[in-house]
Amino acid sequence: MNDAFVTTAIKKDRYLKATRLVDQFESEIIRELKNTCKRIIEDNDKLFPDDPSLSTKKFDNSSSLRTLRVKLPLNRVVSHEEDSDTVTFYMAIEWTEPEDRGEDSPTDSALCVAHYKLLPTPREDFESVKAQTNEAGDWNIRFGDDIHDSDRGVCYIPITDATEMDDALSELRKHVSTYGHEYGVPM
């Protein structure tokens, strides 16, 4: 960094313009995620409590380059055991290094995916949904380990533009409607 760079950034509001652009982008993505989650709730009212609260989070850490996510509780618990944990639904747009998901990057850039996961749930539930989905053969969904917790599974679709994001969120919504009841047990 040099003095001319800093001076130009201050005089021309480059820093402010860049941060405003990031804030606007993230707000739009979160809005799309929330709208998708609202449609999932409408389609699957028995999976969710009445009037569930949607919470959002934006973060980056050692596992992801950036994650924008929405989470909400389900009317499901992990098992029939007393004091079993409540299952939570997460939907996100996430950027990672391609190799973190076992993907190739033809452009040498980060991998962006739309994904959902349900936590905590037995790994067997995830493997069952994965097998049923693969057997059906008509889904574009991929399965992998959650990069934030390798013991958990995630359903994801790589995306490269707005149209692919809309299509991926729509397909994930349908997938939750088809297989969401396979995770955990009703409360």
Image (tube, grey):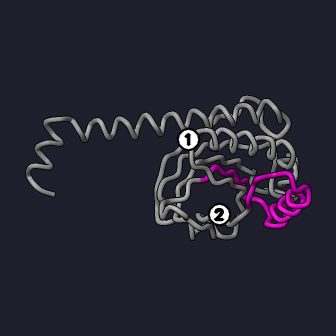
**In the figure, is residue 149 to the left or right of 15?**
right
For label 1, the crowd category at 10 Å Cα-Cα, with few meaning under 14, some 14 to 19 and many 20 or more, is some
Q: Position of residue 53 (x, y in %)?
A: 65, 34
**In the figure, is residue 187 to the left or right of 148?**
right
Asked if residue 23 is positioned above or below residue 122 in the image, the reply reads above
Asked if residue 100 is positioned above or below residue 15 in the image, the reply reads below
Disc 2 is placed on an element classified as strand
Residue 79 lies in what quarter of the image?
Answer: bottom right
Q: Is residue 130 magenta?
A: yes
Q: Which residues are magenta?
A: 113-142
For label 2, the crowd category at 10 Å Cα-Cα, with few meaning under 14, some 14 to 19 and many 20 or more, is some
Q: Amino acid at mark 2?
A: Asp
**In the figure, is residue 45 to the left or right of 29?**
right
Residue 106 lies in what quarter of the image?
Answer: bottom right
User: Residue at horizontal 84%, vertical 55%?
Assistant: 184
Nearer the observer: mark 2 or 1; the answer is 2
Viewer-side residue, 92 vs 6: 6
Q: Position of residue 58 (x, y in %)?
A: 49, 47
Asked if residue 131 is positioned above or below residue 15 in the image, the reply reads below
User: Residue at horizontal 73%, vertical 59%?
Assistant: 142
User: Residue at horizontal 11%, vertical 56%?
Assistant: 2
Disc 1 is placed on an element classified as strand
Viewer-side residue, 124 vs 21: 21
User: Label 1 belongs to which residue?
Assistant: 56
Q: Amino acid at mark 1?
A: Thr
- Outermost residue on the left side: it is 3
- N-term mark: 2 or 1: 1
Cα distance between the residues tagged 2 and 1: 18 Å
The numbered disc on residue 146 is 2
Q: Position of residue 159 (x, y in %)?
A: 61, 50
Quadrant in which the N terminus is drawn: bottom left
User: Residue at horizontal 71%, vertical 43%?
Assistant: 73
